[in-house]
Amino acid sequence: MEMTSKLIDKDEDIMQASLAMKAIAHPLRLKILCVLAGSELSVQDIVDSVGTSQSNISQHLAILRDKGVLATRKDANRVFYRIGDPRTLKLVSMMRDVFCSRE
Amino acid sequence: MEMTSKLIDKDEDIMQASLAMKAIAHPLRLKILCVLAGSELSVQDIVDSVGTSQSNISQHLAILRDKGVLATRKDANRVFYRIGDPRTLKLVSMMRDVFCSRE
DNA sequence: CCGCTAAATTAGCAACTACTTATATTTTAA
DNA sequence: TTAAAATATAAGTAGTTGCTAATTTAGCGG
């Protein structure tokens, strides 16, 4: 079985995992993901929740969308974002278990 | 209880989590962590396992050490590294569950 | 002391990131 | 058709990252 030697041993998996983490490892992007955890939201909703410029949010959304983390739906002149990759959702929820203070 | 709204809601926790992920979200550093999962290793062992220059490995080890991810032990003229932060160990093992292909 | 090995540090640089400001696109509403 | 709102894109730039090559530090054996 050889379970103890390496945690991940395929270079391809290493690459995949580190790309995914890189997409998430930014305070604004992580906050976007946390805000989107419950429901889909329009860009303006996200701007209001997260708190930076519309342009900046839009650029971070594009990064997450292009990497397949977020999916979008257009309704009239608004665009709604949601977490489209179940692995990311799981990853973010695991982050909470590991890093969040409890009270 | 309000469980569904946000996954992580404290900005401080967001910061902590994204800093931790940033440290890990690099192919060489993730590989180092995977190699160190089972046992402590000397720098030269890590260089051999991971495969880049000694200088490069040393710099990545310094990053991980300075962020509290790795701990060190010196023996004669060699330095042994191990994963010193249990949260990181848990995080990397969770990464495997989420991202690794199974056969 | 000297030479050898292991590891860390430094300097320099190309590439990339994250932001700001400004502009463009799309859609609705008057 | 024009104005306004929502979103995206573009351009410019300061700051950061990741590497290489060269040097330095430290411990060991002769």
Image (cartoon, coloured by chain):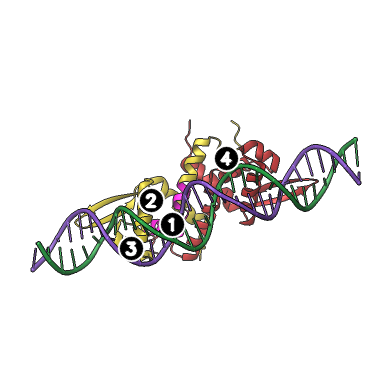
Chain colours: A red, B yellow, C green, D purple
Callout in the foreground (4, 2): 2
The vertical placement of A27 against A18, above or below, is above
Q: Label 3, on which residue?
A: B54
Q: Amino acid at mark 1?
A: Leu
Q: Position of residue A47 (x, y in %)?
A: 66, 39
Looking at the rendered structure, the kind of residue marked 4 is Leu
Q: Earlier in the sequence, mark 1 or mark 2?
A: 1
For the residue pair B94 and C8, the one nearer the viewer reads as C8
Residue labelled with disc 1 = B30
Rendering coords of residue A64 (x, y %): 61, 52
Residues at discs 4 and 2 in contact (Cβ within 8 Å): no
Q: Residues within 10 Å of mark 4 (few under 14, many from 20)?
A: many
Would residue B47 appear left or right of A99 to someone viewing this image? left
Tell me the magenta residue range. Answer: B20-35
Residue occupying image coordinates x 66% and y 40%:
A46
Which of the two discs, 4 and 2, labels the residue nearer the N terminus? 4
Q: Are marks 1 and 2 on the same chain?
A: yes
Up the image or down, A93 lies above or below B44; here it is above
Task: Specify the quadrant of the image occupied by residue C11.
Answer: bottom left
Disc number lying in front (2 or 3): 3
Mark 2 to mark 3 CA distance (whole Å):
15 Å
Residue B15 appears in the figure:
yes
Q: Amino acid at mark 3?
A: Gln
Q: Which residue is mark 2?
A: B64
Badges 4 and 3: C-beta atoms under 8 Å apart? no
